[in-house]
């Protein structure tokens, strides 16, 4: 049985929860490279306690962001369940961007690669597969331009998440994504 599977004593469980909460706050505000000492201090524990519970930074990142990533996965499911594929595409983008605008750490988790053996990596892979289906559905409906690709989402997120007026930026981009307004794109 690994350290992550053993039932924790009440004080150890409390310390773990305090560390995860502090990590969400600190990573969310400062990014994933924020000092671990600051997280331990905010949680009210020694740095050794942090490393005892989370031997690597990635272990702490996973504990802090897996619930948020699972929420993102649920958003992809909602988008796929939308009756209108274009509405599902827009719903996915709006929710994803709102989550990233509110949380720098989550934005970095979305942009960072994690191994498929980690729960973060596996969940990101599942989200990517669903994002591809969201795009395909919107294209097959004739609403989304046929040359929009999954990797174009990186441009969407980069263009919107840095602005407090992200909804306006997204609106401008969505108009350019509509099939009826499409002009051929250069291949880079």
Image: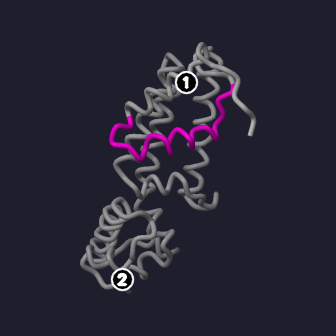
Residue 94, horizontal then vertical, whole percent: 42, 33
Task: Using the image, determine if residue 92 lies above or below residue 119.
Answer: above
Q: Residue at x 53, y 56 (%)?
A: 120
The one of 161 and 94 positioned closer to us in this rendering: 161
Front of the two marks 2 and 1:
1
Residue 76, horizontal then vertical, whole percent: 50, 35
Crowd tier of the residue under label 2, counting other residues whose Cα lies within 10 Å: few below 14, some 14–19, many 20 or above: some
Q: Secondary structure at mark 1?
A: helix
Q: Secondary structure at mark 2?
A: helix
**Lower position in the chain sequence, tag 2 or tag 1:** 2
Screen quadrant of the C terminus = top right
**Residue range (magenta):** 147-166
Q: Which mark is residue 176?
A: 1
Residue 181, horizontal then vertical, whole percent: 59, 16
Q: Residue at x 60, y 58 (%)?
A: 113
Task: Using the image, determine if residue 87 lies above or below residue 170.
Answer: above
Quarter holding residue 31 = bottom left
Q: Is residue 42 left or right of residue 55?
A: left
Crowd tier of the residue under label 1, counting other residues whose Cα lies within 10 Å: few below 14, some 14–19, many 20 or above: some
Quarter holding residue 140 = top right
Quarter holding residue 138 = top right
Q: Which residue is mark 2?
A: 49
Task: Using the image, determine if residue 114 lies above or below residue 163.
Answer: below
Q: Residue at x 39, y 71 (%)?
A: 7
The one of 108 and 11 positioned closer to us in this rendering: 108
Q: Whole-Å distance between the Cαs marked 2 and 1? A: 51 Å
Residue 125: in magenta span: no
Q: Which mark is residue 126?
A: none
Task: Using the image, determine if residue 26 lies above or below residue 54.
Answer: above
Q: Is residue 161 left or right of residue 176?
A: left
Q: Residue at x 58, y 29 (%)?
A: 134
Residue 154: in magenta span: yes
């Amino acid at each position: 049985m690994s350290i992550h599977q053993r039932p924790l004593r009440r004080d150890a469980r409390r310390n773990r929860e305090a560390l995860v909460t502090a990590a969400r706050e600190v990573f969310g505000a400062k990014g994933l490279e924020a000092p671990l000492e600051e997280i331990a201090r905010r949680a009210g524990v020694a740095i050794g306690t942090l490393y005892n519970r989370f031997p690597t930074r990635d272990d702490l990142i996973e504990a802090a962001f897996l619930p948020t990533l699972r929420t993102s996965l649920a958003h992809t499911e909602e988008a796929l369940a939308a009756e209108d594929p274009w509405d599902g595409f827009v719903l996915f983008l709006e929710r994803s961007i709102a989550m990233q605008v509110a949380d720098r750490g989550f934005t970095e988790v979305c942009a960072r690669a994690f191994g498929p053996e980690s729960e973060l990596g596996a969940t990101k892979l599942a989200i990517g597969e669903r994002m591809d289906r969201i795009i395909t559905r919107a294209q097959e409906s004739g609403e989304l331009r046929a040359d929009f690709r999954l990797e174009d989402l990186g441009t969407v997120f980069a263009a919107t998440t840095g602005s407090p007026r992200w909804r306006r930026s997204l609106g401008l981009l969505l108009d350019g994504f509509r099939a009826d307004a499409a002009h051929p794109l250069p291949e880079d």
